[in-house]
């Protein structure tokens, strides 16, 4: 880890991740970051909740992976949000399953995510709860305050809101670029660049 | 009123009333409009405006018509049907036969619409059996139920359980609430056939219907059967009064025509009957499909008394209920929660979109469900300059920085920076026009300091780096010292493919008592716009109406640019005047925020 300024707010890793010093990452060895991801202060990632079952039981011969949380590139985890792998009983034993997240995923402030899978180009608002084992496909927008019920599948190009959340609209054709988080990535860190107009 | 962030809406030309009602002089027509004149200015508060204003992302663009197209005017074609829950594609042939809902095991909770999951009904305290809760470990075979993990509704509340953990849709169709089985349409047909063959009367639906009364599907089948027999056995009744002849009610011809419409296929068409005239009798009994409305509601009242209001379902839940042909007609019945059925997911579609005028496809997604790519996607944002609005904060100004979401202070001038970004590869010339006072009772003053300017082409990204130093120079050259106050006739800032100009606004006071009698023609015009054509001189001092505190500026934008003439080969057009002028003009609405009340 290169630390250019002696005591910046963020730790900037070689792969370009910007992790706030005041973020809580538990079980870091089980957390995979794809790079260029921003983790703001007071974020919590529960990497300690790994699956307690030998994953080989059904899928036979896969490499034993201990990943609890996998995050792609250019994700942005806002202040106070929490990523927690979902858990359930499987053949009589309680086990956690990994939480996987694609690229360009924005997670708003104080949001709790317990999804099994989040695609790429997903915007999750503030104060949202994403229930256990939810599956969120690409180009989905979840508005502030939504509660996504457990096991819900949200197809691509959905705009979702409500408690419980339901699909309230469709992402228009011209709205794809708005999910891009490269500029947002540049605007935070120890040497933030102003967002272009 | 909660504050809002500034926004820009664009108007689609399909709302141009000149296309529909020529000579109407409707305010929303951009035709016959003079720049700088308020005549014919677009009124964003007009009821019609609701249907024509869209954020830029929602608009498409037809390259053949060179026009903006909006969700309201485009023609859609369904490319793929799929279930939003299991994400399986449904062939369009299935839509006709099975309907527009998922027929796998995807259901929504009838109480709260969260997804239902199939779980084993076994709730033994023995931890070894809890594994059955996972439906992938389905070898236990115990009864299964649909469970809502959000509100804890369970299909057991309506007495519905399943033998298998898959194919729930099919199992549910054979089950009434309470667990009693019902015949599917196919089974009923077979039963009827058996009855006919066994010599019994064809109208034996007493045996077919069960104790729940005749459900809608059975009733329809009975009616259909009745008319079928009527048609085949009608030997021209010939009774006098069929003045309408072939077209009369109950005439065999119209009957067979109607039946071929509603029962699908021309199987009922009887050639012989064509020549026949006369009437046939109508259904008279339940067996024949006549169901008399049950006006006795005492049972429902009794149930209401015992279950109370909590036992009934609300209108939203009722609306979400799928049509259930397996229940009797709703005559004289009340809806109780015990009648709720799990909601099979409505299918979703991928659609391509056509220009309404030239019929060219302007958006076409890949048909596969799992891909998010598009084959064609002509979005307006690639052709029309985008407009972003930000309050102008001068670097030299005192510490007071207005929060962009804050309410606007009445009568206090405020400056906004409008940034136009050119998406096309040509330099464009922009002309702006706004009314000097916004329409409505509370007219705010608007001044665009630089209504005409050019924006450089959206050049290659690599050029941006080279040009970057020029930016500051250009800015200095055009508006002098960047720390200076905004000046009339000068742009504020310029970049690779964008230009910022300043618009100055004096928000109106929202006090009704300060409203003045319309002093001039402008006032008249406003009165007209707010659908009050009767007495013009009278001041409307009514209380503040919905969204009257919203400061929205109508702005007419004209974009002009030149392109290489079509058909000309590249390079050879140098010497000739091979440039072609293009122009795009449209109304926009700049929403700045809400004006504070009370002063
Ligand atoms: Zn339109
Ligand atoms: Zn499905
Ligand atoms: Zn529910
Ligand atoms: Zn067209």
Image: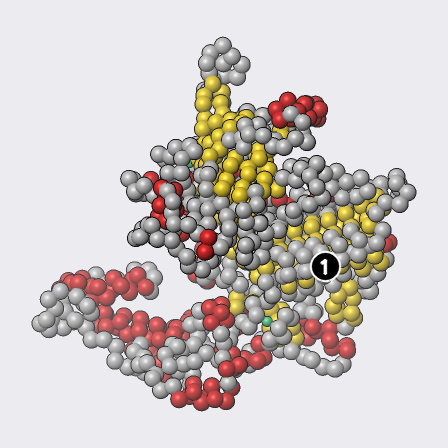
At which x and y percent is residue B280?
A: 19, 73
A131 vs B208: above or below:
above
Q: Is residue B140 left or right of residue B350?
A: right
At which x and y percent is residue A136?
A: 65, 55
At which x and y percent is residue B208?
A: 39, 80
Which residue position holds label 1? Answer: A110
Say if residue B198 shows up in the picture: no
Kindly identify the residue that appears in the image at 23 percent across and 72 percent down.
B230
Q: Using the image as rendered, state which of residue A56 and residue B324 is in the foreground.
A: B324
Q: Is residue B296 left or right of residue B2?
A: left
Q: Using the image as rendered, state which of residue B462 and residue B284 is in the foreground.
A: B462
* Residue at disc 1, secondary structure: loop
Q: Is residue B274 left or right of residue B551?
A: left
Q: Quadrant of residue B242?
A: bottom left
B270 vs B417: above or below:
below
Name the chain under label 1. Answer: A
Which residue ends up furthest to the top in the rendered image? B575
Kindly identify the residue that appears in the image at 58 percent across and 79 percent down.
B156
Say if residue B581 shows up in the picture: yes
Q: Residues within 10 Å of mark 1 (few under 14, many from 20)?
A: many
Which residue ends up furthest to the left in the rendered image? B240
Kindly identify the residue that appears in the image at 51 percent across and 73 percent down.
B341
Q: What colour scheme has been applied to the protein in the rendered image?
A: secondary structure
B280 vs B81: above or below:
below
């Amino acid at each position: 880890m290169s630390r250019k300024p002696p005591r910046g707010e963020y730790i900037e890793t070689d792969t370009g991740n910007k992790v706030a010093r005041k973020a809580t990452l538990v079980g870091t060895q089980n957390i995979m970051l794809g790079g260029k991801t921003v983790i703001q202060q007071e974020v919590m990632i529960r990497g300690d909740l790994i699956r307690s079952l030998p994953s080989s039981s059904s899928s036979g011969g896969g490499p034993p992976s201990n990943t609890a949380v996998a995050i792609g590139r250019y994700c942005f985890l806002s202040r106070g949000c929490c990523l927690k792998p979902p858990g359930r009983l499987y053949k009589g034993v309680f086990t956690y399953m990994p939480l996987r997240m694609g690229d360009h995923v924005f997670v708003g402030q104080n949001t709790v995510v317990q999804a099994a899978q989040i695609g790429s180009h997903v915007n999750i608002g503030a104060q949202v709860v994403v229930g256990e084992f939810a599956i969120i496909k690409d180009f989905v927008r979840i508005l502030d305050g939504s509660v996504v019920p457990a096991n819900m599948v949200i197809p691509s190009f959905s705009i979702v809101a409500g408690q419980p959340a339901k699909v309230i609209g469709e992402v228009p054709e011209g709205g794809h670029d708005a999910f891009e988080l490269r500029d947002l990535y540049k605007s935070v860190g120890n040497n933030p660049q102003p967002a272009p107009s | 009123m909660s504050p809002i962030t500034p926004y820009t809406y664009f108007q689609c030309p399909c709302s141009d009333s000149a296309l529909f009602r020529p000579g109407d002089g409707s305010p929303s027509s951009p035709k016959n409009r003079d720049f700088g004149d308020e005549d014919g200015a677009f009124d964003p508060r007009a009821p019609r405006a609701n249907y024509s204003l869209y954020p830029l992302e929602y608009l498409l663009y037809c390259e053949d018509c060179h026009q903006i197209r909006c969700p309201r005017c485009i023609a859609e074609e369904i490319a793929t049907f799929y279930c939003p829950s299991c994400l399986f594609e449904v062939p369009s042939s299935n839509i006709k036969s099975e309907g527009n809902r998922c027929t796998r095991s995807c259901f929504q909770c009838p109480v709260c619409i969260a997804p239902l999951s199939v779980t084993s009904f076994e709730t033994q305290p023995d931890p070894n059996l809890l594994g059955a809760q996972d439906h992938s470990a389905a070898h236990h075979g115990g009864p299964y139920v649909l469970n809502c993990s959000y509100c804890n509704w369970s299909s057991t509340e309506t007495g519905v359980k399943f033998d298998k953990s898959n194919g729930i849709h099919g199992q549910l169709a054979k089950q009434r609430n309470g667990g009693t089985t019902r015949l599917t349409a196919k089974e009923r047909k077979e039963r009827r056939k058996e009855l006919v063959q066994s010599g019994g009367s064809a109208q034996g639906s007493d045996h077919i219907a069960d104790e729940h009364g005749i459900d809608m599907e059975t009733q329809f089948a009975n009616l259909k059967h009745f008319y079928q027999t009527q048609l085949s056995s009608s030997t021209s009744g010939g009774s006098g009064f069929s003045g309408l002849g072939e077209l009369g009610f109950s005439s065999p011809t119209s009957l067979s025509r109607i039946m071929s419409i509603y029962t699908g296929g021309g199987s009922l068409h009887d050639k012989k009957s064509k020549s026949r005239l006369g009437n046939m009798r109508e259904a008279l009994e339940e067996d024949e499909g006549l169901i008399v409305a049950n006006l006795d509601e005492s049972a429902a009242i009794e149930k209401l008394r015992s279950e109370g209001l909590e036992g009934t379902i609300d209108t939203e839940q009722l609306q979400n209920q799928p049509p259930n042909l397996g229940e009797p007609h709703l005559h004289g019945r009340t809806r109780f929660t015990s009648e709720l059925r799990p909601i099979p997911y409505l299918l979703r579609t991928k659609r391509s979109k056509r220009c309404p005028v030239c019929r060219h496809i302007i958006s076409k997604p890949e048909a596969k469900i799992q891909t998010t790519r598009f084959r064609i996607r002509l979005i307006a944002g690639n052709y029309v300059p985008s407009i972003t609005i930000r309050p102008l904060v001068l670097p030299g100004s005192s510490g007071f920085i207005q929060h962009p979401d804050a309410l606007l202070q009445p009568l206090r001038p405020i400056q906004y920076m409008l940034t136009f970004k050119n998406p096309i590869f040509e330099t464009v010339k922009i002309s702006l026009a706004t009314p000097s006072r916004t329409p409505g009772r509370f007219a705010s003053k608007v001044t665009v300091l630089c209504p005409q300017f050019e924006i450089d082409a959206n050049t290659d990204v690599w050029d941006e780096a080279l040009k970057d130093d020029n930016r500051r120079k250009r800015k200095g050259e055009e508006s002098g010292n960047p720390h200076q106050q905004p000046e009339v006739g000068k742009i504020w800032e310029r970049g690779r493919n964008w230009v910022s100009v300043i618009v100055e606004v004096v928000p109106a006071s929202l006090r009704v008592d300060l409203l003045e009698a319309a002093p001039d023609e402008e006032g008249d015009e406003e009165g007209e716009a707010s659908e009050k054509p009767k007495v013009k001189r009278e001041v409307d001092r009514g209380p503040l109406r919905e969204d009257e505190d919203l400061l929205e500026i109508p702005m007419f934008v004209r974009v002009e640019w030149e392109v290489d003439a079509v058909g000309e080969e590249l390079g050879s057009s140098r010497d000739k005047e091979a440039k072609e002028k293009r122009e795009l003009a449209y109304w926009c609405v700049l929403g700045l925020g809400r004006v504070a009340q009370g002063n």
